[in-house]
Amino acid sequence: MILDPNAKEVIMAWPLWRHMLRESQRHALRAVDEWNSSNGNYSDFIGHMHKAWLYLLHAEFRRDKLPFHYTDDVGQPKIIDGESQAWGLEDCLKKRYSDANDPVRRNVELFVKLRNKIEHRYERELKIATGGKAQALVINYEQEMTAKFGEVYSLADQLRFPIFLRALSAEGVGELREISKRLPRRTRDLVARYESDLDRVVLEDLRYDYRIRLVPMVGPKSDADLAVNFVRLDELTEDERKVMVDAGRSGTVIVRDRQVEVTDKDKLRPMQVVRLVEGQVPFEFTLYGHHTEMWRRLGVRPPNGAAKPWETDPRYCVYSEAFGAYVYTTAWVKRIVKEIGTVEKYRAFFGREPRMKVSQLPNRNVSPSITGSEARKLPA
């Protein structure tokens, strides 16, 4: 019997998969240390997480007696330095996640590509630009490990929430955005090309890119309060869920100074949108003949009676639960004009000719001083 003071179990003649898992955990903890350290190295973070994932999947395959070694043309193991050559991480991911669009697989595969592309002088910029994806990489790892081996192997009690400085202020966020723009074009292009092949569902999945919102906690504090509380959307009321979802989509920073209740501020009703668009185009633009068709085809909001009416594109439309109606933003007006603002664009979008506006000319037989009601009484 071997006693490990850092383990949550008594170690008795560990099987090989357990040694693999322990090595995986060691690399994961080293990776998080690199991330949280003020002078940590982002390339080392990626390298350690690469190994953590590789050994984790090897441990799964070993325990479950699944093959994970390369073979030659006759089915014999390929030998390197006297050992069978085990699969690389990409091949392990294909075995574990057969769906090529699985968000977890796509997240890890991105870091496999980044692993050999990092330029050390641009590590800070890359760390900022891919921070949400790095967070997802670690969370996915923890969830995979506990799902396959049990909560006893969780690393959660060995990790701490990092302390932030300027990143929590609006100025700090703006500074981070400017820093991320300094990434070399070839690195930015690598990420852009990779994500151009991903479905929108994958791009917005937290398992691919983990984005969080930090809101300062106000009000009385109890002894049971933690510095950080996590909220699950499926445990909120409909009103609470809508607020959180809208805030998460908009990506804005909320600073609470005082309580001011404003409903649908700066939002437009459908007919207001129609009138604003008509004032900027040379043809007729109607509510049902044009506006309805545009929001349907551009996926701005779900149809009437949808089970989840709040699933809109918040850049252009928001669902008002109190009134059971949709309201629109000024950005939606700009989008409409951009899409169909000329006769050529109108034809391309709707596939038909626009109905041009007709200027109202005065009747030559009527004196300009005669009113409209009087003119109608005159003989033709």
Image (cartoon, grey):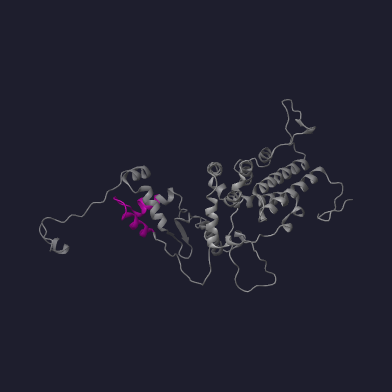
**Compared to 135, does 257 lie above or below?**
below
Residue at 77 percent of width and 44 percent of height:
20
Residue at the top extreme? 74
| Rendered image quadrant of residue 218 | bottom right
Residue at the bottom extreme? 220
| Rendered image quadrant of residue 277 | bottom left
Q: Position of residue 245 (x, y in %)?
A: 54, 59
Left or right: 312 as drawn, with respect to 288: right
The image quadrant where one finds the C terminus is bottom left
Q: Is residue 284 magenta?
A: yes
**Compared to 332, does 98 lie above or below?**
above
Residue toward you, 140 or 370: 140
Left or right: 352 as drawn, with respect to 160: left
Query: Which secondary structure type mostly characterizes the magenta part of the structure?
Result: helix
Residue at 75 percent of width and 49 percent of height:
26
Q: Position of residue 13 (x, y in %)?
A: 87, 46
Q: Is residue 285 magenta?
A: yes
Residue toward you, 371 or 377: 371
Q: Position of residue 255 (x, y in %)?
A: 53, 66
Residue at the right extreme? 1
Residue toward you, 26 or 66: 26
Q: Which residues are magenta?
A: 270-293
Residue toward you, 129 or 16: 129
Residue at 65 percent of width and 72 percent of height:
221
